[in-house]
Amino acid sequence: MYTLGIDVGSSSSKAVILEDGKKIIAQAVVEIGTGSSGPERVLDEVFEKTNLKIEDMANIIATGYGRFNVDCAKGEVSEITCHAKGALFECPGTTTILDIGGQDVKSIKLNSQGLVMQFAMNDKCAAGTGRFLDVMSKVLEIPMSEMGDWYFKSKHPAAVSSTCTVFAESEVISLLSKNIPKEDIVAGVHQSIAAKACALVRRVGVGDDLTMTGGGSRDPGVVDAVSKELGIPVRVALHPQAVGALGAALIAYDKIKK
Amino acid sequence: MSEEKTVDIESMSAKDALGYFLPKVDEDARKAKKEGRLVCWSASVAPPEFCTAMDIAIVYPETHAAGIGARHGAPAMLEVAENKGYNQDICSYCRVNMGYMELIKQEALTGKTPEVLKNSPASPIPLPDVVLTCNNICNTLLKWYENLAKELNVPLINIDVPFNHEFPVTKHAKQYIVGEFKHAISQLEELCGRPFDYEKFFEVQKQTQRSIAAWNKIATYFKYKPSPLNGFDLFNYMGLAVAARSLNYSEITFNKFLKELDEKVANKKWAFGDNEKSRVIWEGIAVWIALGHTFKELKGQGALMTGSAYPGMWDVSYEPGNLESMAEAYSRTYINCCLEQRGAVLEKVVRDGKCDGLIMHQNRSCKNMSLLNNEGGQRVQKNLGVPYVIFDGDQTDARNFSEAQFDTRVEALTEMMADKKASEGGNH
C-alpha cells in the first residue's frame, strides 16, 4: 500500500511516497513553494521517479503553509505534527526537533511515546529562518550551498547582532565595507541564526539530543553553530527538507490503517 | 425619554439588547455633552461608580478602540497617531485613541471634520471634560491619560492601585486605595461644584453588583459539556461589562442572555451542535481586528472556547457601602497579582471550563498580559496536563497578526489535544 505526503512550504515544495508506512519509495524537493507551480511540479517529479500514479495512492495528506491548496489531498495536518512524525521516523528516539525552514523556525518537544508535548515557533520575524540565510548569501555573493564551507574557514567570527533581517543585512554590508574577511562575516551570520533558533529550543526544553530538519540543516555551518550554541550533539535527518512530507505520508498511512 | 418609550426592550433578544445598549453608552455621552453635562473618558477597569453617582457620562477609549478595530477602522487612526510620533511599539488601543482624539480635537478647533474622521467607522464620542484612569490592569494607562489630560487641558483623576505581590490583597493596600477613592471624590466635588452624592453612590454600587452578578453567572454555563455557551460571546457581551456595569443596561442584557442560555440547556442546543471536539481557553485580549477569523479557525477545528481569564477582569464583586471591599475588588484583577495568584486563576478557568488546551495571545500591545504567558502555560501543563500554544498578535494593530501563523498554531494544538486523548484511550 502506498501513501503520499506533500509539504507545501513558503519557499519549497516537498513530496514523499511511502510503502506500507515503512519504506520511502521516492522523494522530491522543488525550490518554490505555495502560490507557485511548485506543488504541481513536485508531484510530477516524485511520480517520475517511480512507476506509480496518483491513483495508486491509498491516502494523501498535505502539510505546510500551502496545505489547503493541494487538490489531490484527502486531508491536511499541521507541519508541527508532521515534522514530529517524520523526524522520529528518521531519527528514532529523538526528543527534540529543530526545523529551520524558509520562513518558519520551529522547535518541537516529544515525550517518550513520540507525542508532541510542546512546540515553539518564530513570531512575525524572519530572523533565524532560511530566508535570513538566503538574504545574507545574496549580499555576500556566496551561493547558499557554499555558505557552510566559508563558515568553517573562519577563525574570528564577526558579531552580527541585529535580529531583524533588514537591519542585519545593513550590518553585513557595513562589515563588508570595513573589509572584515567574508568567512568571519559568514560565521557571524550562522551564529546569529543559531542564537535565534536555539532560543526556541530552550523555550521547549533542551533534551539530550537534537534532530535538525528543514532546508537550514543542509548547511553544515548552521548545524555546527547550533551544536556549539547548545553544547549538545546534533543529528540531521536523512532527508532534512522532506521530513514534513514524510510525516504527512506516515500519517496518511496511519489514518487508513485504523 | 420619548425615544426610550418607543423601544420595546422587554421583547428584545440578548443580542438585540446588546446592539441597542452598547451604542447607547456613546449616545448618552453625546446627549450629555449637548445638554452641558460632563463627559468622562475612563480606563476600562477604573471604578465608574464615582462619576456615575455625580451624573457624569462615561465613555471608554479601550472599548471604543476595540470597536474601531473590529470595524477595520484602526489603520487610519494608527497612522494619525504614528504621524504624531507615537511609536508602533506603544499599545495599539492607546495609539487608536490618540489618533481619534487628535482628529476630534482638530474638528473642535477648526469646525471642520477631517476627512479621515469622516471616513472612519468609529462610533462618534465627545471630547472629555475629565479623564479617569487606574493602573490596576496596566501602567501605560497612566501615561496615556496623563497625555490626554495635557493635550485636552482637562483634569485627570488617577486611582493608584498597588501591585499585589502578595495575595489576598493586604489590609494596608486596601486602606491606601480607599484613600485614593476619597481623593477622587474630592476632585469630583471640585469639578462639579457640589458635594458628592453618597446616596446615589450607594445605589450605583448596588446596580454595579447586580450587573456583575449576572456577568459572572454567564461564565458558569461552561460547566456544561457540551457547552451551550460559546466563549467568543463573552468577548461580544464584555463591551457592556466594561462600559455599562454601573448602569442597568448591562444587567438587563446579561439577564436576557442567561435566560437564553437556560433555554439552550433545556433544549440541548449546544454552541457547536454535536461538533464540540475539544474545549480551549483563550488567554489574553481578543484579536478584535480578526475576531471572525480566529473564531472560524477554532470552529473549523471543533475547538470551542470555554474559558478565559480576561472577561473575569470585570468581576468586581464587593459589598455596597463598604469602600474597603470595593478597593479589594478593583485591586484583585488577575494581572495586578503575583504569578502565584495569576497561575491559580488560570488553573481555575481551565478546570471550570473543562478545557483540553490553552491558547495564549502574545499581544504586542499588552506586555503586562503577555510577559508571563510562558510561565502560566507551563504551570497549567505541569499541574493539569493541558497543552498550550502561544501565538503572536495584537488587539487592534493588524500589522502584528498573521492569520496563517495563527491557524498553524491552533491546528497543531488541536492535533496535540486529539493525540493526547487517543493515547489516554479516548476518541481520536
Image (cartoon, coloured by chain):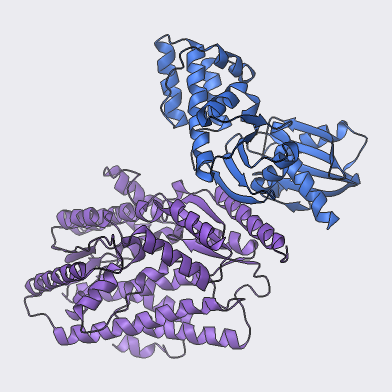
- Res. A250 in view: yes
What is the quadrant of the N terminus of chain B in the image? Answer: bottom left
Side of A233 relative to B9 (left or right): right
Q: Residue at x 58, y 21 (%)?
A: A221
Q: Residue at x 6, y 76 (%)?
A: B193
Q: Residue at x 72, y 51 (%)?
A: A76
- Give x and y (percent) for residue A141: 55, 15
Count all numbered tags in the image, as a single digit.
0
Say which quarter of the image contains residue B172. Answer: bottom left
> As displayed, is residue B132 above or below residue A7?
below
Seen from this angle, which residue lies furthest right?
A51
Side of A144 relative to B216 (left or right): right
- Give x and y (percent) for residue B84: 26, 44
> As displayed, is residue A43 above or below residue B130?
above
- Res. B13 in view: no
> As displayed, is residue B74 above or below residue A196?
below
- Give x and y (percent) for residue A35: 66, 40
Side of B123 relative to B70 (left or right): left
Q: Nearer the viewer, residue B13 or A75?
A: A75
Q: Nearer the viewer, residue B368 or B187?
A: B368
Shown in blue, the chain is: A
Q: Nearer the viewer, residue B221 or B13?
A: B221
Shown in purple, the chain is: B
What is the quadrant of the C terminus of chain B in the image? Answer: bottom right
- Give x and y (percent) for residue A109: 60, 45
